[in-house]
Amino acid sequence: MTNRIIELFGSKVFNDAVMRERLTEETYNKLHRTIKNGTQLNPEIAQEVANAMKEWAVENGATHFTHWFHPLSGATAEKHESFISTAGGGSVILEFSPSNLVKGEADASSFPSGGLRDTFEARGYTAWDPTSYAFIKDGILCIPTVFISYSGEALDHKTPLLRSMEALNTQAKRILHFFGNDDVDHVKATAGAEQEYFLVDKKLYDKREDLILTGRTLIGAPAPKGQEMNDHYYGQIKVRVLEFMHDLNEELWKLGIQAKTEHNEVAPSQHELANIFMTINVSVDQNNLTMEIMKKVAKKHQLECLLHEKPFARINGSGKHNNWSLKTDTGVNLLDPGETPGENAQFLIFLCAIIKAVDEYQDLIRISIASAGNDHRLGGSEAPPAIVSIFLGDELTEIIESIENDSVIVGHKREPFQLGVHALPSFPKDNTDRNRTSPFAFTGNKFEFRMPGSSASIATPNTILNTVVAEELKQFADRLENCEDVNAGIQELIKETIRDHKRIIFNGNGYDESWIAEAERRGLSNYRSTPEALAHYLDKKNVDVFVNNGVLTRTECESRYEIYLEKYYKTINIEAHTLLDMMKKDVLPATARYAKELIISLRNEYEFGVMDSNGYSYKSFKHITALQKAISNDVEDLEKLLAQDKGDDPLTIAWYFHDRIIPLMNSIRYNCDMLETLTDRSYWPMPTYKDLLFGVD
Ligand code: ADP
Ligand code: MG
């Protein structure tokens, strides 16, 4: 087995080993430098790289190539082109020119651009990101690219991510300089995503219009058994699921993706997979690819993989924990507290930059994970609340408090902690991971951001994290550069930052009601819904942080604001129309048939003189017809509201859907779920929660 893994691992990736084997030493060295430093591909070597890549791809069964990118619509996009060119005389050759590798042209007009299209040409370009390896998927050579408009505006998730990595690199190196670490060439953010998902039987899925069109169930009474026994968590994995996981692992290995854990999650039919952490842009690509492969492999096993944040009401939804840290090319994790006083002080500076960043840009961090799907999870006692806060653990909190107050800490009996002189007492790593309710938790040598939803790309949360931390590092570096006594300056900076930003630190239970009041008292923001959060996207300080760090221009921010809002209300619009369709074509007709059956039985009872107004048929009939009436009234209202002109301000439209459409949908669902509990199973027109959640053997 081990040999097989070694053989499979990365076999479909044009990785370092393949490059070394297939390129001349000179070209390999140049390409290697490009990858390491994240610079642009040297055109001189493009020809040789393209040839080697094509030969390798064809030997491995590829017939086509595509630039693989992440437009703002969410899913990954591909435009396949064949390697085949005509060579005269009816013969063909396989061709892949350097320009095919370096740059592609895509019609941008069918991807969301948030107004950029009005000002700029419809054409867009894709350009290779050589720091993410090319790979073969379904016989197609996929080249990871960025996607930009003709005039260079970012039209994708990746461009700003790469820009934010550069900003972070520049500022982190300035900080390292104060600690004498000038040997560091590069600082890169690392990320590892833990992906939750549900598996349901494909045949059942195919009978649910809501799952097919919206990814979640819009109606469904609870199954008699839910997650209350906690018997699914880490429980025995079912055979069919194991077979799926086995296949999934193999497919991921081939693509050089290491998936670490696989276990059952809290809800029935829910599972988790964690990718081993990588440099952030590679990790983003790998997570996107993982989601795609999960869906594909599931189908092979007659399963359907649900990545939606809340596929089922009243049981846990799915999130994606984003583990984030900073690593130097010399192999140092900058969020590891270290052992010497010098390492400790450096760690504390980075820690303080993060504390300040998360406090000052709570709203952006909340915005980075805002979506219609995630609105169902946040604050529902299954995921962190919509309030952003940091968990540091008792030991680390005690240390920073003692720094702030010049007080003596346990384990450091002599005198107040002095940076660069005293070493931090070591604190057990395990203690840092106890509190699972915090949205942003320090877990020993990295932060775990637990708010992202399961279906979204982790590109945006990481772009924002990188950007806001880069901003604070920049401010720190500017200040330290003007200090005569750098050591004293560092000590002062840390004290001041803790004093001014400690309100963001919260080690208590984030699911507790009292935290909401406490957070308000501390002045922390609590944006419960996507429109509420997005309303702050264009706040001056937010646009400034993007612009000043070279991550997004003002125009790009404006276009993203529109796209995010559009995505929100379009999602709800589709859900509302799907719900209407299900009511009118399935639920109301089916329950009308059942009501007719009840009438027949009532008539019989009447004829036999045994009719009883307290009897089952009579009561059910009354109850069912009342619910049907309530539903059809709501259906009519919903149709009217959906048809109304909502103006063209995207925020107003988003609020309209939030305030008017969602409550009506909830009302329909409430009545429909009651109706389900009263209807004869054989009449109910679709698989139930019991079927879906307990239907995989
Ligand atoms: P757990 O104890 O919860 O399994 P791990 O430390 O094993 O936590 O990691 C959980 C996730 O965090 C994995 O995806 C892992 O790759 C990622 N991770 C670990 N270290 C780092 C790091 N330095 N930077 C980013 N992600 C990391
Ligand atoms: Mg986790």
Image (tube, rainbow, N blue to C red):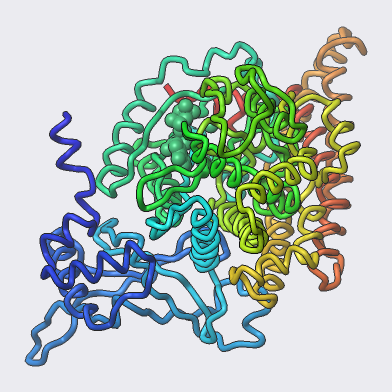
Q: Of residues 249 and 258, which is closer to you in this image?
A: 258
Ligand 1: which quarter? top left
For residue 546, what is the image quadrant? Answer: bottom right
Q: Residue furthest bottom?
A: 88
Position of residue 594 relative to residue 326, above or below, is above
x, y percentage for residue 469? 62, 54
x, y percentage for residue 580? 74, 49
For residue 120, what is the image quadrant? Answer: bottom right
Residue drawn at 85 percent across, 44 percent down: 663
Q: In this rendering, does residue 162 appear at all?
A: yes
x, y percentage for residue 363? 75, 52
Residue drawn at 40 percent across, 56 percent down: 184
Q: Of residues 200 and 521, which is closer to you in this image?
A: 521
> Is residue 596 toward the left or the right of residue 449 in the image?
right
Q: In this rendering, does residue 226 appear at all?
A: no
Position of residue 649 relative to residue 5, above or below, is below
Q: Quadrant of the C terminus?
A: top left
> Is residue 508 toward the left or the right of residue 51 in the image?
right
Residue drawn at 56 percent across, 88 percent down: 121
Position of residue 132 relative to residue 336, above or below, is below
> Is residue 101 toward the left or the right of residue 214 in the image?
left
Q: Residue furthest top?
A: 610
Residue drawn at 47 percent across, 23 percent down: 264
x, y percentage for residue 291? 44, 47
Q: Quadrant of the N terminus?
A: top left
> Is residue 185 toward the left or the right of residue 9 in the image?
right
Position of residue 96 relative to residue 161, above or below, is below
How many numbered marks does the figure carry? 0
Q: Of residues 322 and 328, which is closer to you in this image?
A: 328
